[in-house]
Image (spheres, rainbow, N blue to C red):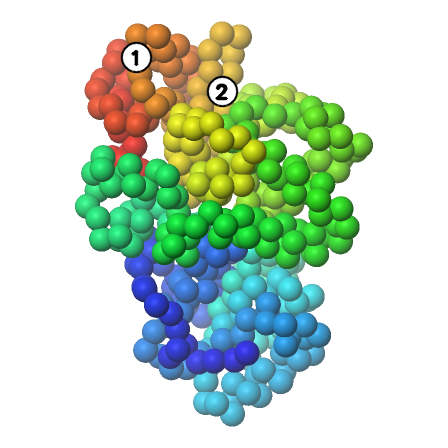
Amino acid sequence: MLTSNSSFIKKWIDRTIDIPIDSSRIIIVTGVRRCGKSTLIKKALLGTNKALYVNFEDPRLINFTVQDFIRLEELLHVQDKSLLIFDEVQNITQWELYARLAHEKGLKLFVTGSNASMLSRELGTRLTGRHYQVELFPFNFDEFLDFFELARSQESFEKYFPLGCFPEYLQETNDDYLRSLLKDIITRDIAVRKNITNETQLTRLAVYLMSNIGKELSYNKLSKTLEIKSVRTVIDYCDYFRESYLMEFIPMFSYSIKKQLGNPKKVYSIDPSFAKANSLSFSADLGRRLENFVFNKIRREHQEIFYYRSANTECDFLVKHNEKIVKAIQVCWQIDTDNMEREINGLKNAQQETGADAGLIVTADQEDTLDGIPLIPAWKWL
């Protein structure tokens, strides 16, 4: 149940995100289950031998309450430790009450959690100004290269593309791992926390969405297609998927908030290979999978992302920063004479309407400039 960080893990990979271990604030690391949150903290603390680690998914802690934190604190002093690591702390109701108390006592606290919305709510009300929050995602391309000790190239991207990003999956590449992970997320992070008894319905919706990454979907149509009686239920379920980092839903760009809310959303998975392993479709839609990789890179760096659609054109991504659309990005597996005009016009129309200065097209392996628009191969852009 409790160990010092001297016993921690197998293969360390330098993540492209750091945590400020010398900060006096509570360090919060959020992200999807099994993306490496606790490993990131453990690696940062290697060599200190001062950490007491508690995994709140240990079945022996099933009846743990907020009052039991004081007992942990006593154990901390008995073992001459000075740091506390709480893994998946969202399982403990009102954990933030103790976190605030520990911070006021001067104890150093590191926390991980797999629910973005829940943590944000609690931190905002109880721990304002006392915490530093980091979002962690599965491996990006650079971290993948580090894991396999590869150089950046087209060949290494072709290895990355079917394998994806989950650290443990890369060790064995067994799709059963990804299917079990989906079940864990749905059961532990959604069904149990939200008191959902119809887990089968929740899973059917998740699998359907995983089978339609990059496509426009409306809540009404999802309700009818999957025979879910209430549209409100569909909306809630999709919110839960987003909160657990399982998927993201991006709106169509419009200056009208009402139109943003009323138009279909596009759905993307936390990892394209994760979506493929849990998909009903066995077709190799390479373009949409590439689009998902591109989305995930944008999402690591920006919160506000849209897709663009006009009467005759579309653009895959618009990136908003400081209340301004700063970049338009088109994704196309291969530019050829059949799609060149459509892809370029979609990008340029999006730039013209939004005022985005930067525009580019990410491709599988092409590098060129067409009508002033750079084509960048994914292995370079990622």
Mark 2 → mark 1, Cα distance in angstroms:
22 Å
Q: Amino acid at mark 1?
A: Asp
Q: Amino acid at mark 2?
A: Tyr
Residue 154 position by quadrant: top left
The answer, for residue 75, to whether it is visible in the render is yes
Residue tagged 2: 308
Residue 336: image x %, image y %? Answer: 30, 12
- 185 or 219: nearer the viewer: 185
Residue that sits furthest to the bottom in the current view: 78
Which residue is drawn at the image coordinates 41% and 14% (left, top)?
A: 346
> In the picture, which quadrant includes the C terminus?
top left
- The image shows residue 290, relative to residue 51, as above or below, that is above
- The image shows residue 75, relative to residue 86, as above or below, that is below
> In the picture, which quadrant includes the N terminus?
bottom right
- 296 or 171: nearer the viewer: 171
Residue 169: image x %, image y %? Answer: 42, 52
Which residue is drawn at the image coordinates 65% and 25% (left, top)?
A: 218
Kindly state the secondary structure of the residue where label 1 is placed: loop
Query: Counting other residues with Cα less than 10 Å from the Cα at mark 2, is it few (<14), some (14-19), or many (20 or more)?
Result: many
Q: Could you tell me how many numbered marks the image carries?
A: 2
Residue 200: image x %, image y %? Answer: 71, 44
Residue tagged 1: 336
Kindly state the secondary structure of the residue where label 2 is placed: strand
From the viewer's perspective, tell me whether residue 71 is left or right of residue 155: right
From the viewer's perspective, tell me whether residue 6 is left or right of residue 30: left
Q: Marks 2 and 1: which is nearer the front?
A: 1
Residue 155: image x %, image y %? Answer: 22, 37
